[in-house]
Image (spheres, rainbow, N blue to C red):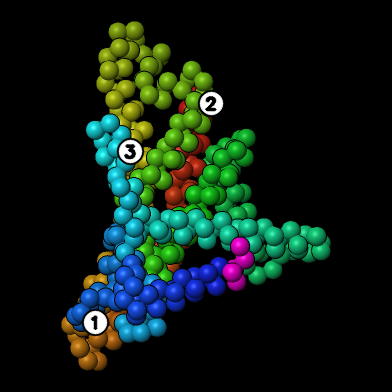
């Protein structure tokens, strides 16, 4: 799918919803409820989850609320799982589609440039520069020797998180990385990658990363230190994915909350005094753009460091 066809498809979906609403055909998309125009909170929907999304519309208030489908719950024994899509799930799928489509276009542009014997230009050149920097300056130095096998996962994590962060800054978007379930899942994937990397690199020595046994201690002290330090070692394993999840979640949520507070001051300080919080809101939004890149970078950097540490844990 080319970028032109993707834009055309999105436009078709947006304008196709309007006739159904106007004709009263029971469309899942509808105008906001009466009195909504008096609300000024346009920030909270960027960080909260829900069973509906907003899409652009050509009539005031210029957006429609679309209710997402509700599926029958899945029963696994006595456990009931609701797999119905939510706003953040839609953002995850949208981010995956945009990332996949964008990288395919970048790859084709790079192949055409190489066939001409020239370097890619514009966006493909910028993406290539980012990939080479993350690979050569972040991943490989921290993962260690023979770390090429971890490059695809870590690059995918970087660009996927970056895409989700940026989607939370655009109108009608939502920050999926402001959902602790999303960041916890990303951290869990890194945790599994770290542990599998340690098992493959150290073999039986991998057990030393969970169970403390120091052969340099006196024989009497070894069992005692084993009982004391082994729980500490296991807790240390869990704190790493916990830190990854909380750091990404907190940083992507905090910026929107600050903007919400400043925008509230705009309406509180009516008149010329509202210019100050307005300017501060703009500054925070620019900072949020930087944070979107920074948090994706930090997640990738720490994941690389954790993988490198476990691979060298044979001591």
Between 49 and 313, the one nearer to me in the picture: 49
Query: Dot 2, crowdedness within 10 Å: few (<14), some or many (≥20)?
Result: few
Question: Please, what secondary structure does the residue beneath circle 3 have?
Answer: helix
Q: Left or right: where does residue 131 sit relative to residue 79?
A: right
The answer to which image quadrant residue 35 occupies is: bottom left
Query: Which label lies toward us, 1 or 2?
Result: 1
Q: Position of residue 179 (x, y in %)?
A: 32, 54
Q: Position of residue 176 (x, y in %)?
A: 37, 57
- Residue in the picture at 77% in, 59% down: 114
- Residue in the picture at 31% in, 82% down: 61
The answer to which image quadrant residue 253 occupies is: bottom left
Q: CA distance from mark 1 to mark 2?
A: 58 Å
Residue 107 belongs to magenta span: no
Query: Which label lies toward us, 1 or 3?
Result: 1
Q: Are marks 1 and 3 in contact (CB under 8 Å)?
A: no
Q: Left or right: where does residue 108 sit relative to residue 63?
A: right
Q: Quadrant of the N terminus?
A: bottom right
Q: Residue furthest bottom?
A: 272
Disc nearer the start of the sequence (1/3)? 1
Q: Assign the magenta stretch its main secondary structure.
A: helix
Query: Dot 1, crowdedness within 10 Å: few (<14), some or many (≥20)?
Result: few
Say which mark, if any, is on residue 239: 3
Question: Please, what secondary structure does the residue beneath circle 1 have?
Answer: helix
Q: Position of residue 224 (x, y in %)?
A: 27, 14
Disc 1 target residue? 37
Question: Please, what secondary structure does the residue beneath circle 2 have?
Answer: helix
Q: CA distance from mark 2 to mark 3?
A: 22 Å
Q: CA distance from mark 1 to mark 3?
A: 45 Å
Disc 2 target residue? 200
The answer to which image quadrant residue 174 occupies is: bottom left
Disc nearer the start of the sequence (2/3)? 2
Give the magenta range: 1-5
């Amino acid at each position: 799918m080319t970028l032109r066809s993707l834009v055309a498809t999105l436009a078709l979906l947006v304008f196709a919803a309007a006739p159904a609403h106007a004709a009263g055909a029971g469309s899942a998309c509808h105008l906001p409820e009466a009195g909504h125009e008096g609300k000024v909170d346009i920030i909270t929907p960027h960080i909260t989850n829900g069973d509906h999304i907003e899409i652009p519309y050509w009539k005031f208030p210029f957006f429609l609320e679309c209710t997402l489908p509700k599926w029958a719950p899945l029963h696994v024994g006595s456990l009931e799982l609701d797999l119905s899509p939510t706003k953040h799930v839609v953002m995850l799928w949208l981010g995956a589609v945009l990332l996949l489509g964008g990288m395919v276009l970048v790859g084709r542009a790079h192949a055409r440039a190489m066939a001409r014997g020239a370097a890619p230009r514009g966006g493909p050149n910028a993406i290539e520069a980012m990939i080479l920097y993350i690979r050569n300056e972040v991943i490989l130095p921290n993962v260690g020797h023979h770390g090429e096998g971890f490059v695809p996962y870590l690059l995918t994590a970087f660009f996927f998180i970056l895409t989700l962060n940026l989607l939370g800054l655009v109108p009608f978007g939502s920050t999926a990385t402001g959902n602790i379930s999303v960041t916890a899942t990303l951290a869990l994937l890194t945790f599994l990658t770290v542990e599998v990397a340690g098992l493959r690199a150290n073999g039986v020595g991998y057990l030393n990363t969970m169970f403390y046994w120091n052969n340099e201690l006196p024989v009497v002290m070894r069992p005692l230190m084993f009982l004391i330090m082994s729980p500490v070692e296991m807790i240390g394993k869990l704190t790493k994915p916990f830190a990854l999840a909380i750091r990404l979640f907190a940083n992507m949520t905090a910026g929107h909350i600050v903007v919400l507070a400043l925008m509230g001051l705009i309406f509180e300080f009516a008149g010329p005094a509202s210019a100050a919080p307005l300017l501060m809101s703009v500054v925070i939004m620019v900072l949020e753009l930087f944070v979107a890149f920074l948090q994706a970078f930090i997640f990738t950097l720490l994941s690389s460091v954790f993988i490198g540490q476990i691979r060298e844990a044979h001591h």
